[in-house]
Image (cartoon, rainbow, N blue to C red):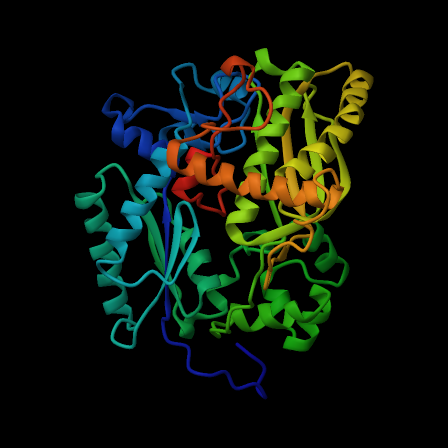
Amino acid sequence: MPSADLTLPPRPLRWLFLDLNSYFASVEQQVQPALRGRPVIVAPVGSDTTVAIAASREAKRYGISTGTPVWEAKRKCRDLVVTPARHELYVAYHHRIVAEVERHVPVTRVCSIDEVACRLLDNENGRDAAMALAGRIKRGLASAVGDYLTCSIGIAPNRLLAKLASDLQKPDGLVVFEAAALPEALYPLKLRDIAGIGPNMERRLARDGVNDIRQLLARRPRDAGHAWGGSDGDRLWYLLHGVDLAEKPTQSRTIGHSHVLSPRHRGYESVRLTSRRLALKAASRLRRKGYRARLLVLHARFEDDKSKWRASVKLPATQDSFVMLARLDALFPRLRAAGAAHRSGCRIIGVTLAEIEPVAGEQGSLFAALDPDDPLARETRTLALSRAMDRINERFGRNAVSVGPLNGGRLDRVGSKIAFGRIPELSEFHE
């Protein structure tokens, strides 16, 4: 219970958090009935050197989970089925799921491709009403979207606790945290179960004498904040007691893409061309969001699966694909040299645009009247060309027009990939 001199506000059930179970694998089992009841993993490419990005509930019984190397998963389960990822399909199902949930309650926030949070109204925040609502959502998803798609639902006074509750009973669970049971209901959990507490934070808390949730919440809020290392500990104390605090505003800080290369495309010319495609995709997203970037980062992981590499280069504040490609090409010899030192090809390649900022109040260029060969005039033309390419590809499909060779299509397909915290717009599948 909170300290005697602390009075907490009323804490009714305000949030319902829905987490789809084994989402990518369940979608594959939904659309491929032959996979139902079988151990299935979804992998980005058809190679044993990659990892599972999803595992069906049947595969999880063998100790296989997201991040398990495919070769290891096959060793754990001889009957394992490996199916390639179809991200556009998962986005389409995501939109169907959100539409069905909204038939029952407004979706306040889409948290990831397989998670949504809904704020409950005053007539929905009693325990019985909230549980009945959760039941209607589950039945609606089964009948309108797919009977092989199940979800776990958490209901609590705030979104953090609702998410925590949704993780406790899988698959097809329903867990409610009421204010009267807080914070004691959380004591059996581990600190690492709380979003935001990873290995480093866990070690910091231990150095301050906090080894479990009970010890953290036994402190006054200010002291809990000190253990956390800042004001967020104070905030976490109140959230774990069920107080529904206002959300902190967030802003995108990076835009990027990465790709797991198939074994036949890990030579450095293939890696270079793939990195250019990734840079073009990131630049297109940057323009669509109305941002410009000041830093480009090229990052890679080598075939030995131990070595991570990154290099960066400053950009003028730009949205221009051609400027980014020129700076990217300047980084690539460093990647080639690193690969030679490791005597290894690239398994994963990625490009990230960082130090991004909104483009506000942009006016027509003052440099359009300059000599055509002036660098500022060239940049004006290439930015206009970059935007024209966006429009053409959006209308006619991916790579209707591109920069540089596509190597006769002999590279891996670099489509839109699911970052679990971000749902691609459908237009991204046509970039």
Q: Position of residue 63 (x, y in %)?
A: 48, 29
Q: Position of residue 168 (x, y in %)?
A: 42, 51
Q: Is residue 115 above or below residue 374?
A: below
Q: Position of residue 288 (x, y in %)?
A: 50, 49
**Which residue is at the far left?**
143
Q: Is residue 18 above or below residue 240?
A: above
Answer left or right for 179 relative to 263.
left
Whether residue 57 is visible to the viewer of this picture, yes or no, is no
Residue under the image location 73 percent in, 43 percent down: 371
Indicate the quadrant where residue 26 lies.
top left
Closest to the observer: 55 or 240?
55
Answer left or right for 254 relative to 107.
right
Whether residue 142 is visible to the viewer of this picture, yes or no, is yes
Indicate the quadrant where residue 109 lies.
bottom left
Residue under the image location 47 percent in, 30 percent down: 415
**Which residue is at the far bottom?**
5
Closest to the observer: 37 or 419?
419
Answer left or right for 375 relative to 211.
right
Q: Is residue 412 above or below residue 30?
A: above
Indicate the quadrant where residue 403 lies.
top right
Answer left or right for 186 relative to 175.
right
Closest to the observer: 88 or 221?
88
Residue under the image location 75 percent in, 41 percent down: 375
Count of labels shown? 0
**Which residue is at the far top?**
264
Residue under the image location 26 percent in, 25 percent down: 32
Q: Position of residue 315 (x, y in %)?
A: 74, 45
